[in-house]
Image (cartoon, rainbow, N blue to C red):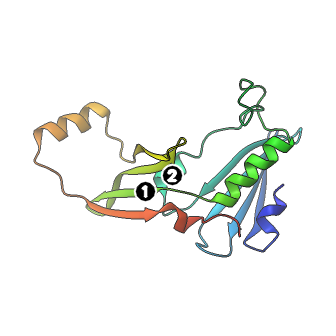
Amino acid sequence: MMHLLTANKQFILFDTTYKGETTSEFYKQQIGDKETVIKVGYLKNGRLITLDVTNPNTPGHNAEQIEYFYENDFDETKSYGSVGLTFSDTNKNAISKILKSGLQGTEKKYFKDNKLEFSKVFKPTGNNNELLGQTHYFTKKSFWLRLFKKLTTAKQEYKVEEIELDKVFTGLK
């Protein structure tokens, strides 16, 4: 399945690690944003457990890459099942679609004094592609402290950087 990543030389395998029952392969993009890395994790039994697309310019998106696949993730008629995807036609087609469609949405990074405070990631979801936003905080302030500061101080000025996620990974060519 991962030959899709290297077939047209868009990605190259640059590292493989082993931890317990998991083998992780790291592919670096050679066409497009060359900082983009795809991590593919396999269990010893051959099941696909992770497929993470990360880039140092998208810390909020990267924070969302901690989910594991379950056996029936792409079968709407069944519940979760065991950890990891088997390579059934349904699963292969779903993974292929994910890789070919690339990333979608935007990430806005908010800096104060040149330090990343938080980012907001907006991705299309559902049949109507409605934008779903999620905020990721990168400072060690508690929820209550952030709320208190928001209520007691004047509006904070942030430097905002926005990145289109499809510029990071447009999908397999």
Q: Amino acid at mark 2?
A: His
**Upstream in sequence: badge 2 or badge 1:** 2
Number of marks: 2
Q: What's the residue type where badge 1 is placed?
A: Glu
Residue 119 visible, this angle? yes
Outermost residue toward the front in this view: 128
Which of the numbered marks, if any, corresponds to residue 93? none
Left or right of 60? Residue 76 is right
Please give left or right for residue 143 compared with residue 89 in the image. Answer: left
In terms of secondary structure, where does tag 2 sit? Answer: helix
Looking at the image, residue 140 sits to the left or right of residue 30; the answer is left
Residue nearer the viewer, 78 or 110: 78
Disc 1: CA contacts within 10 A as few (<14), some (14-19) or many (>=20): many
Location of residue 7 with respect to 80 vertically, above or below:
below
**Considering the numbered disc 1 on the image, is that residue within a helix, a strand or a loop?**
strand
Q: Is residue 34 above or below residue 140?
A: below
Residue visible at 82% across and 69% down?
Answer: 7
| Pointers 2 and 1 in contact (C-beta within 8 Å) | yes
- Residue 22 showing in the rendered view: no
In the picture of the structure, the residue carrying the numbered disc 1 is 107
Pointer 2 residue: 61
Q: CA distance from mark 2 to mark 1?
A: 7 Å
Quadrant hosting residue 38: bottom right
Name the quadrant of the C terminus: bottom right
Q: Residue at x 72, y 26 (%)?
A: 80
x then y, percent, for residue 78: 75, 24
Task: Give residue 71's position: percent from left, percent from top.
Answer: 78, 32
Few, some or many C-alpha atoms within 10 Å of disc 2 (few <14, some 14-19, many ≥20)?
A: many
